[in-house]
Image: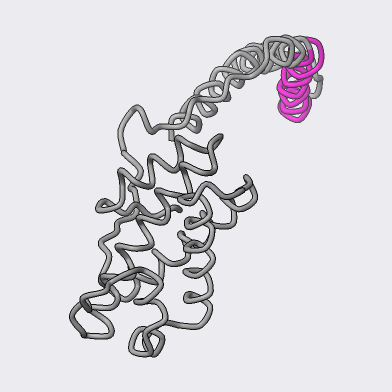
Amino acid sequence: MNRVYPEFASELDAAERYTNDPRAALMYLRIVLERTVQRAFVQLARYPLPPDAALSNLMDDVRFIAVVPKEVLERMHDVRTSGNRAVHNEPVSPSDLRRARTSIDRILDWAAYCGFVDTHVPTIVSGPSASPRRSTPEPGVVILWVILYVVIGAPFIVFLFAAAGSYIAFFAHGTPFSAPIPTLGIVIGVAVAIAVPLFAWRFMDASSDG
């Protein structure tokens, strides 16, 4: 999940808006880099900014180099050189911007880890607006399942209960068709056949709400 850097929000937002204008976007990213380097020089290297606090001078200062990881320093130089070409109206390309954006993300992650750049991770807002949409079966699928149940499922359930009733009647009275037991089995089978899809629908509805 992407971090958010409140103190650089306007510059980073501008760089996003100027995606089709690499020169303008690189200028904004260079501003972010310059402020980050100044902050690192003061809070990590623990030195006041020198009178000539140009970006290149700060980044070449041995006191600064001593506290910045090599990989981060290389990315800083990459953003600086691309930003300088943009400032001086020299050729820049979309690939320069993509590389600089990747570098500035890594630089700000490092700065946030060191604690001299404020950051936060966006949270997911809870509530109805954040709830996943309930998945509704396609009408064709529902119709197919209804047909299959009516043609196969429901008669099979009725048959099972009727057979069970006949089985009980056979052992109780010596004939599978005596007394109301088989009829009662059919009635129960019909009731179960009707209840099964109702309970199944309620279960799927409750699952989609959860």
- Relative to residue 63, is residue 142 depicted above or below? above
Q: Quadrant of residue 204?
A: top right
**Snapshot quadrant of residue 171:** top right
Camera-side residue: 21 or 167? 21
Residue appearing at x 31%, y 38% in the figure: 126
Which residues fall within the magenta stretch?
148-173
Residue 186 is situated, as x and y percent measured from the top left of the image, at 69, 13
Q: Is residue 175 above or below residue 123?
A: above
Instruction: Identify the residue at the far left of this view.
Output: 48
The dominant secondary structure in magenta is helix
How was this image coloured?
Answer: one colour
Instruction: Report the residue at 51% width, 44% height from top.
Output: 23
Q: In the picture provided, is 120 more to the left or to the right than 18?
A: left
Horizontal and vertical percent position of residue 180: 66, 12
Instruction: Give the percent coordinates (x, y) of residue 19.
Output: 53, 38
Foreground of the two, 126 or 175? 126
